[in-house]
Amino acid sequence: MWWRGRLHRPFATVEHPFEMAVVVPCYNVAQYLDDCLSSIAAQEGFAATQVILVDDGATDETPHILDDFALHYANVTVVHQENGGLGNARNNGLDLVTAPYVTFLDSDDILGEQALSLMLQAAWRDGSEVVVGDLVNFPDRPYGPWKQYFGSGDRRIDDLASVPDLIFSGSACNKVFSTGLLRRLGVRFGEGVHFEDAWVTLPSMLRAEAISIVDRPVYYYRGRPDGSSIMDSLWSKPANYRDHLRLNHFLLNYTVSEPADVRRMFQRYVTRTYKGFLCNARSVMGRRQLEEMFPDLHRHYAEIPDDIILEYATNPAQQLDHYAAKSGNLELFCDPAPALAEAPLRLEIDDDGFHRGFEGGAGNTRAARVNDPNVVVESVRTRGDVLVVEGCMAFPGMDISGPLDNRLEFVHQTAKAKISVPLRQVARRDLWNTRNNRDLYAGWYAEIPLADLVSGGFGVGDFRLRVHRVDGVRHRNVVMKARLPLHRLKGPGRIGRYPYMLTIGGQEALHLRLVDRGLRARAKHALWRTAREIRILRTRNPGWRMRLAYWLTYPFLNSREIWLIGERSDTAQDNSYHFFKRIRTNRKRRKAYYVIDGKSPDHAKVAPFGRVLKLGSFKHRMYLLHATKLIGSYDSESYLVPDGYRKVLFLHRFGELVKYQRVFLTHGISYNDVTSGIDQRITSYDLIVAAGRQEREYLALEAGFGDRAVLAGLPRFDALRREATERPRILLMPTWRQWIVTASYKKAAGPAKTAFTQSEYFRFYRSLLSDRRLAEALEHFGVDLEFFPHYEIRPHLHHFRLDSPAIQVADPKTRNVQQAMKECSLMVTDYSSVFFDVAYMGIPLVHVPFDEEDFYGRHYKRGYFNLSEDGFGPVCRTVDTAVDEIIAAMARKFTVESPYRERAEYFFAHRGDGNCERVYEEIDALGDASAIALGPSGPVAELPPAPEVAPLADAGLQAAAYTQEKGRWERAV
C-alpha cells in the first residue's frame, strides 16, 4: 500500500484555489473505503484538490466513514442522497465541481501514486482537455487494445483517429477532463443504465482540443473476489443488453456526420463492445424479448461494414449471429439450428474466400464466412493405370450433412499444368462420430487416370481441392495436406509404367513427382533420390543409423517376402499367436516371424515354434523395414516398432522406406460403433478379418473396407473347445464404464465422474451377487458362479460382499479368460464382446444391459448389433429378471433355446476348424505387391450425384427432395 505513512495532515481551512476535483460515488463499500480515501489523501497536491464524496443512499457504514473523513479535511464535501445509481451520483457530484479539471474514482478502487499531479501537469504542459493515464487491474485480468499506447512514454495526441484503439479505454476513472469541456459539450453520465462512463468519455475524447498520455499507472481497478463488482454481472442481466445498445445508437448517431476515419473508429467500438451481448443474448433472454429488441439490433448493425464485423466476429457461430443481425433475419438469430439444417449446402465465393447466404433478411452482408476447409489426404494408391486418392475435409462452421451444391474437383497442380478430375463425396461414419454427429459426408474420393497425369507433364506437383461457385463463374482452390496414415504410403511408387515419388515435408506439405519412363529421366530421378538420401543421412537426425542399416541390408532383404506377426509387445495369446502357431506348424516354409519382448513371460510360450524376433533387436529393426506384411491383433505400429519410437515418429522417419501390407486380425468381434478408431481411411489396413456376417457387412460399408473386409473367422476360434468341469459353472463377466473408473492408461484424465459405490453398475452387480434366490438355486442345482470382472474394475472388488460359497472371484494372475470361457456352462454379461466367443461354442447366454442408455451415451456408440433383436440369449434389465433367466437355464441343464440358437448359426459363417487356414489364404492372395499398389476398386458409400441446384428462392422444394434422398444415403451406410 503505497500511501502508508504518507497521508496529508488534517487541515480546517482551504488556503489555495482548487486545481483539480475528484468525484467519488459511494454505495455500500465500507470494507474498501479506507484504501480508496487513503489513496486520495496521500496524493501530491491534495490540499489543492476538491474532493466530492457522494453517498448514494448506502445502508452500511459508508456514510459514517465519509463524514469522519470530511471532519479531518476542509477540501472534502460529502453529499448524502437517496440511491440514484452510479451515473446519477457522478452527475450530482460533477454539478458541484468548481476546479478547472476533474477526475472520477470508484469507491472500491485506488488512485496510483502521484496520479493527480502527473495528469494535471500533463494537461498544463500540453494544453490538453483530456488526460489518459495507465490503468492496472488487480487481480490481473485481460486488458483492451488501448493498452498498446502505453510503454513508450508520455505524449500529446492531436487527433483521436490517429490512435483509434484508445477509444476502447471507455472508463472515466483513469482520465482527467477539463471541466469547461464537459460543460461546453453538455455531456452527462448515463443514469439508470449500466454503461454510464462512455456517454461522457467518448464524446469528450472526440471533441477535446488535445489528449495527453501519461505513461504511469494512475488507477488500480479492483476485481472483487466475491464477484459483486458491477462488471462481474455484465452478461447476466437483460437490462445491460438494452443499455449498451442504447449507448451504441447514441454514439453512431453522434458521429454520423464525422469524417470516414472517425465513423469507422466508432463503428469498431460498437461492434467490439457489443459482440459479447449479441452472441449471448439467446442464453439470457426469451423469444419475446429477442423479438422486441431485434429491430434495434438490426438498425445497429445495418450500416457497419463487413470487414469491421469480421475483425471481431472470429468464429462461425459469432459470424452467423452478426450475419442475422445485419441482414435482419429474425428467425436465424432467434433459433439458428433449424435455419442451418434447412439451408442449402451451398458455398458462395468472393475475393476473400467462402461465405454462405440464408433465406430471409436483406442479404446485405457476407459476414457468414466459411474459412478455407482443412482438406487432408489419407491414402494415395494405384490401381493399374489409375491413381486413387482418398481423404476428408472440414469446412469450419458448416455441417457437410449431404452433397454440396457446389461442383468439387480434385486438382493436381504442377508448374506447367493443372489436371482436374471430379472429387466424389463419400459417407464417413468415423468423421460423424468424432465430429459430434456432424460431417457424415465429409469424406472424398478421386481417381486420376495415368493419361491425365502424363498430359500435365513431369515434375513436382501438389494436390488441391477446387470448389466451383454454383453459377460456374468462379472457383477457389485449397491446398491439401497429408494425414498420418499417408506417411506409410509415401516414397517411391509406380503407376502403370511410370515411376513416381510421393514426399511429405514440413507442415504436412504433400508433393507428387511423376517421372518420365525414358532412360535419361529415370537416371536423373535416381540421382536425385540418391542425393536426397545422402543429404538425409548426412544431417544425422535421430534414426539415421537405422536408415543407413536399411540401405546396407537392402541387397539381401529387399527381395525376400517377410511376414511379421505380433500382438501387444509382450503378449502371445490372441489371434496373432494362434495364427503364427498354425503357420509354423503347417506352413513352415513361409518366412513368418513373431515379434515379442524378450523379457516377456509369453516369450517362452512362442519360442519353441522358432523364428521369434526379440523386440528392438537389429534383426527385428531390419526385418520391419523390409517386411512385406505386418500382421497383428492390435495396431501394429503402436506395439511392434522398436523402443524409443512411437507410431507417429516411426512413420514420419521411415514411412517412405516401408512397403508392407497391413493386416488386422482383430482381437475380438466388433459390434459397437468403433468406426472412429477402425475406419480403413485412418487405420490404412489392407485387409481386416471378420467372423460374423453382420460384422463383415458393417466393416465393409460403415468402416470403409469394402472388399478388403474378409469373412474368414478369427484364428483363435480354432482353439475354442468346450471343456467339461466337475461342477457346472456360470461365468459372470461384466465390462467396465469409463465414467465410474478412469482407465489405467488415462490416469492424467483425473478421477472418474461418478464414485464407484454410487454407480448403477455397483448397485446392480452387488444386488445380483447377494441375491438370496440365486444363492439358493446355485446350491440346489450344484452349480458354481465365477465372477470375472474387467481388469479396470478390480481395484474396487473389496466393495462387493460374497456370502455364498458357490460364488468365487477369478484371479487374473492364475486364471485365463479363454480357459474360463471354455469351462463355463452359461455366461452372464452386459456388453463384453466375449459373449461372441461363448456363443461360438454353443454355450447359452444371459444379457444384462441394465444401463443401456448410459452405456451408449457415455462409453460407446451403438453399432449394427442390437441385443434385443440379434442377441444370443434373453435380455434382462433388472436383477429379478436376470435371476429368473439364470435359474431357468440351470433348470434346463444349460441348453440353448430357439431363437438364440438360430441367431448364432446365422451370425457365424464358419464354425469349427479352418479359421487360420482361411485367414492364411486371404493374406496370401494379396500377393507381394507393395501396399501402394493395392488401390481400392472404387469408393465405399459414395453419394449419388447432387440433384439439379434450384434457385435460392425455391430452396424449400429442394430441401424436401433432399430429405428423401438423404434417408436413402444414410441407410446405405
Image (cartoon, rainbow, N blue to C red):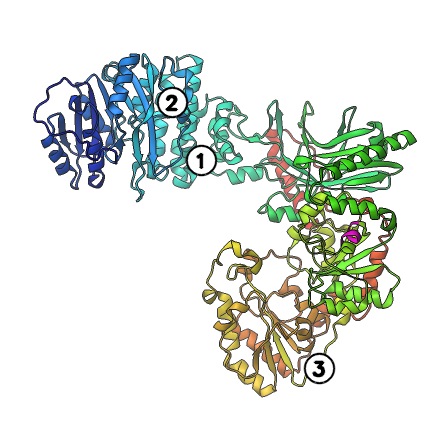
Q: Residue 483: image x %, image y %?
A: 68, 41
Q: Residue 257 versus residue 178: which sits nearer the camera?
A: 178
Q: Inspect the image, locate mark 3, and give the three-letter code of the amino acid beneath it.
A: Ala
Residue denoted by label 2: 167
Q: Gap between marks 3 and 1, in whole Å?
A: 68 Å
Q: Are marks 3 and 1 in contact (CB under 8 Å)?
A: no
Provide the residue designation for mark 3.
724
Q: CA distance from mark 3 to mark 2?
A: 85 Å
Of callouts 1 and 2, the N-terminal one:
2
In this image, 894 relative to 109: left or right? Answer: right
Element at badge 1? helix
Question: How far from the left and from the top, in percent, is residue 542?
Answer: 69, 44
Magenta stretch bounds? 621-625
Q: Nearer the viewer, mark 1 or mark 2?
A: 2
The amino acid beneath tag 2 is Ile
> What residue is pinned by disc 1?
279
How far apart are labels 1 and 2 at the CA level?
A: 22 Å
User: Which quadrant of the structure image shows residue 607?
Assistant: bottom right
* Amino acid on which the number 1 mark rests in the picture: Cys
